[in-house]
Amino acid sequence: MSARRVALVTGSNKGIGLAVVRALCKQFDGDVFLTARDVGRGQAAVEGLKGEGLSPLFHQLDITDPASVRAARDFFKAQYGGVDVLINNAGIAFKMADTTPFGIQAEVTLRTNFFATRNVCNEFLPIIKPGGRVVNISSMMAFTTLGRCSPDLQACFRSDDITEEELVGLMERFVKDAQDGAHSQRGWPDTAYGVSEIGLINLTRIQARRLMAERPGDAILCNAACPGWVRTDMAGPKAPKSPDEGAVTPVYLALLPPGAKEPHGQLVSEKMVQPW
Ligand code: NAP
Ligand code: DDD
C-alpha cells in the first residue's frame, strides 16, 4: 500500500473538474486522480495534462453506476488506505432551450447531481482519512432556486436539523411532482438543476454534521463550493470565468491547511462563506 496522500476528482475529463485536477497536480502534495465515466475520454484528458508537464493518474468512475463507485472505493482503500481529498464535481444540466419533458429532466438531473453524488459520498466518506477534505461542487443558483420554492419547502431546506432521509424524501417528491406535471402547484420552481443544487448544499450540511458527530477527532472538513459562472460545455462560451478560474474556490477548500477547523458544512463562493 502506498503511503502517499491521494486526491480524486469526479467527472474530471473536461470543464471545471479537469481544471481542478490541473491545479491539484501543481499544488497538492500527493497523487492526483483524474476520473471519468468514459475511459477513452479520461485517458485523453490525462494525456493532455501530461503534455503540460503534469502527472495525473487515472481511474474509471461513473457516479451513477454503483458497481463503478464500489470498485473505485475498493481501489483507493487497497492502494492508499483511503482518500485524503474527494472533490464531487461530476454533474449535468439540460440546456435552457431543451424541450425534453420536465418530468424527465427532473428525474435525469436529480439522478446524477443529487442521488449519484450522495451514493459516492456514502461509499467514500467512511474511507476519507483523518485531516481529509471533501468538496461538493454546487452552484449559487441554489439560492435563487430556494427563493422560488414555497414557504414550507424553504423552511425544510433552511432547517439546521433536516435529516438525510428527509432530504432524500424531498428530492424524490420533486421528481414525482414533476412527473405528475404538478410541481408548480406543489411549490417547486421550474428548474431541475436548481433543485438538484439545493439538494447538494443540504447534503453537504448534513454530511458535515455527521462527520462532527461520528468522527469528531478526525478533523475532516466538508464544504460545498460554487465555482462561479464558468465557460464549459455545460454553461456555454459566454460565461465570464475560465475553467482554471472556476477551479480556484474548490481547490482552496480542498487544500485548507492541516489544523483548520473551518469552514465546515458551508457553501463557499469566491473563497467566502455564503449564509444559507
Ligand atoms: P461539464 O463541462 O459539462 O463537465 C461535466 C463533467 O461531469 C464531465 O466530465 C462529464 O463527463 C462528467 N459527468 C457527467 N455525468 C457523469 C457521471 N455519471 N459520472 C462521472 N462523470 C460524469 O460541466 P462543468 O461546467 O465543468 O460542471 C462541473 C460541475 O460544476 C457540475 O457539478 C456543475 O453543476 C458545477 N457548476 C458549473 C457551473 C458553470 O458555470 N459551468 C456553475 C456552477 C456549478 P462526460 O464528458 O463523460 O459527459
Ligand atoms: O451557475 C450555474 O450553476 C450555471 C450557470 C447559470 C446557468 O445558466 N445555468 C446553471 N449553470 C449551469 S448551465 C445551466 C444553466 C441553467 O440555468 N439551466 C436551466 C436549468 O434550470 O437547469
Image: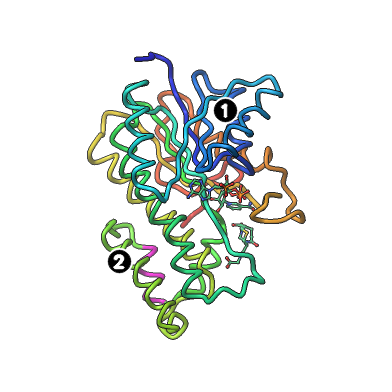
Q: In the image, is residue 58 above or below residue 204?
A: above
Residue at the spot x=43%, y=46% of the render? 63
Q: Secondary structure at mark 2?
A: helix
Residue at the spot x=72%, y=43% of the render? 242
- Left or right? Give the position of 48 relative to 92: right
The tag on residue 24 is 1
Instruction: Give the amino acid type for the residue marked by disc 2 in the picture.
Output: Gly
Give the quadrant of the N terminus: top left
For the record, the magenta segment spans 151-158
Residue at the outermost left position = 214
Q: Position of residue 185 (x, y in %)?
A: 44, 86
Mark 1 surroundings: few (<14), some (14-19) or many (≥20) residues within 10 A: many
C-alpha separation, residue under disc 2 versus residue under disc 1: 35 Å
Comparing 253 with 103, the one in front is 103
Q: Position of residue 98 (x, y in %)?
A: 63, 71
Q: Position of residue 49 (x, y in %)?
A: 66, 27
Mark 2 = which residue? 169
Instruction: Give the amino acid type for the residue marked by disc 1 in the picture.
Output: Leu
Our reading of the magenta stretch's main secondary structure is helix
